[in-house]
Image (cartoon, helix red, strand yellow):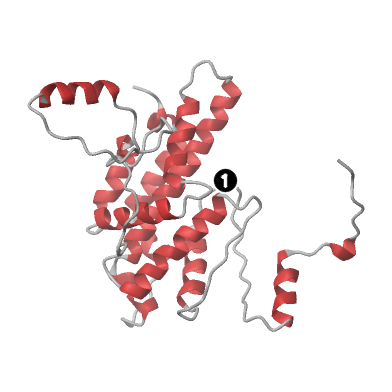
Amino acid sequence: DAWEHVTSDVIQTPLEVFKGLEADGFPIKYARVPITDGKAPKRSDFDTLAVNIASAPKDTAFVFNCQMGRGRTTTGTVIACLVKLRIDFGRPIKILNDDMTREESNGGSSSGDEALGCVTALTSNTSQTKIDEKQNRVFGINDILLLWKITTLFDNGVECREALDAVIDRCSALQNIRQAVLQYRKVFNQQHVEPRVRRVALNRSAEYLERYFRLIAFAAYLGSEAFDGFCGQGESRMTFKVWLRQRPEVQAMKWSIRLRPGRFFTVP
């Protein structure tokens, strides 16, 4: 490989690139939302994205990018899809004409294998089948009790999380935010791996769990009356930040992830 000589004249920031496109006549708007690499968006970040998406014309195309074009880019795309579903189709949030392959009912496994989509016929040997399934069963996302708690905390939690999971699967070309939790958990529980690697895997798994956790809360917020004002359906416009502040139990759950992440991922 040969080094290429680069001068400051040929280097542009993203803002400069977009300004150049705007000067050329393209109907484009640039919005920057600073989010730390590997971290979940803050409550105010969700609001910033929601306001930009809700105020854009109906036929607007949204483009997201980050340093690697993976984690934060995927998260932004998921948020945009949720907001657009809510604005375009109202409540409850749901995926229309969903013909994609559904995953296992427990939301994926830490084995990393893709669901085969097979239908198992019922037989007279049901008891033996259940025993085999229990023995061969791997840890799934729904085995994390915290996620069950926040899903059932909201009246619309189950249907909103189903819509969220469908959106996550649609936006998983580079990364599946939900399955990332299980992938890092699998590394953390491999005893032969170096302690440093296990520690990094635990931190990353906790960060993705918090990201998924916040997305569940955000989906529930979009599915509530609090967001009606952004859709022109109500007078009040309660932001996600204010809505979440009124639910201290959600904040307590979030801090349990940060303070004791190991208890959510350790093999029993």
Q: Is residue 255 above or below residue 215?
A: above
Q: Which residue is mark 1?
A: 38
Where's residue 88, x and y in %? Answer: 36, 74
Residue 199 picture quarter: top right
- Extreme residue toward the top, this view: 192
What percent of the width, then of the height, locates residue 64? Answer: 58, 62
Task: Give the total number of marks visible in the rendering.
Answer: 1
- At horizontal 89% and vertical 56% (from top left) the residue drawn is 6
Give the image quarter of residue 2. top right
> Residue at image x 92%, y 53%?
5
Horizontal side of 96 relative to 54 (left or right) equals: left
Residue 134 is left or right of residue 74, and the answer is left
Label 1 residue SS? loop
In the shown orientation, is residue 33 left or right of residue 135? right
Within 10 Å of disc 1 (Cα), the crowding (few <14, some 14-19, many 20+) is few
State whether residue 175 appears in this view.
yes
**What residue lies at 50% left-to-right and 55% top-to-bottom?**
75
Q: Which of the 4 quarters of the picture holds residue 220? A: bottom left
- Please say if 55 is above or below 7: below
Residue 214: tell me if it is visible: no
Return the residue nearer the eye: 21 or 91.
21
State left or right for residue 237 relative to residue 44: left
